[in-house]
Amino acid sequence: MRGPERAAIAAPHLRTDRWWLAPAATTAGLLLFVVYSTWRAFANAHYYAAPYVSPFYSPCLAENCRTMRAGPNWEVFGGWWGLSPAVLILVFPLGFRLTCYYYRKAYYRGFWASPPACAVAEPHRRYSGETRFPLILQNIHRYFFYAAILVAGVLTYDAVLTFRDEHYAWGHMGLGTLVFLLNVVLIWAYTISCHSCRHIVGGQLKHFSRHPVRYRAWRFVGRLNAHHMLLAWASLVSVALADFYVYLVASGVFDDPRFF
Ligand code: FES
């Protein structure tokens, strides 16, 4: 902070390393994903290539979703929905990631320079943290976590369905199956490494000794939680990769290589 509370140090910071590298790389990575996902979400095309349905479009919640029912299709929005059906889905994983503790740190630093890095003064004169509107809404994260569990469940179902071929016969396995399996593992790892999950599993207990199952679960989630940043990026890349794979196959760039 450059406000009156700041110690009387003339230099904006005393760091001599390349502290700007991490926020710059974060900003570039997030921007790349935002551009890609916006293009794909509004393209409303090439999101289904039997047996694969893009994770951006699953489950289908409107009639204008054309996946031939390879994945779960609950057309609860009927025929009046005119926009891309991806918009109905992406609001949940987007809300989950936007309110994620790690991503908050990442985009506060990368986009708002608040602060740009540890021990580097931010350019703003006042700081209210997340105590006021609109940032107080970040507290909704726990509810997005519940939605994210459902989304991960749907993606798991989709990954299982990739073991069927285009005629819905079981026993298929293609390169896309591996892409989908990798994605769903990373999505689950990111989801359950969430700080809210850690609190739900092991919080509000006085004695771990009386809750050995929850203690073991909390330890497991805690170990994953230590890698939350890595999992956040890995799952972001894998979900884009799974979508891009479907795009390439659906648009005829190449055929899905089959192992059996
Ligand atoms: Fe990152 Fe919950 S804290 S997903």
Image (tube, rainbow, N blue to C red):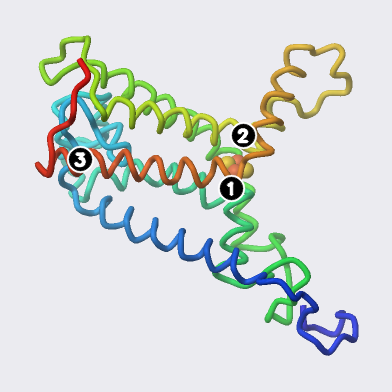
Q: Residue at x 80, y 83 (%)?
A: 3
Q: Does 18 sit left or right of 27 as displayed? A: right
Tell me the amino acid under the disc marked 2. Ser
Could you tell me which secondary element the residue under label 1 belongs to? Answer: loop
Q: Is mark 1 within 8 Å of ligand 1?
A: yes
Q: CA distance from mark 1 to mark 3?
A: 27 Å
Return the x and y of residue 257 as percentages of the image width and height: 18, 28
The label number, if any, that marks residue 47 in the structure image: 3
Q: Is residue 108 above or below residue 78?
A: below
Q: What residue would you read off at disc 1?
A: 100
In the depicted view, which residue is nearer to us: 110 or 175?
Answer: 175
Return the x and y of residue 47 as percentages of the image width and height: 20, 40
Q: From where the camera sits, is residue 9 visible?
A: yes
Tell me the amino acid under the disc marked 3. Tyr
Q: Residue at x 27, y 50 (%)?
A: 41
Label 1 Cα neighbours within 10 Å, binned few <14 / some 14-19 / many ≥20: many
Task: Give the quarter the ligand 1 occupies.
Answer: top right
Q: What residue would you read off at disc 2?
A: 193
Task: Please report whichever mark, 1 or 3, sits nearer to the chain's N-terminal start.
Answer: 3
Q: Is mark 2 within 8 Å of ligand 1?
A: yes
- Is mark 3 in CB contact (under 8 Å) with mark 2? no
In the depicted view, which residue is nearer to us: 112 or 64?
Answer: 112
Q: From where the camera sits, is residue 141 visible?
A: no
Could you tell me which secondary element the residue under label 2 belongs to? Answer: loop
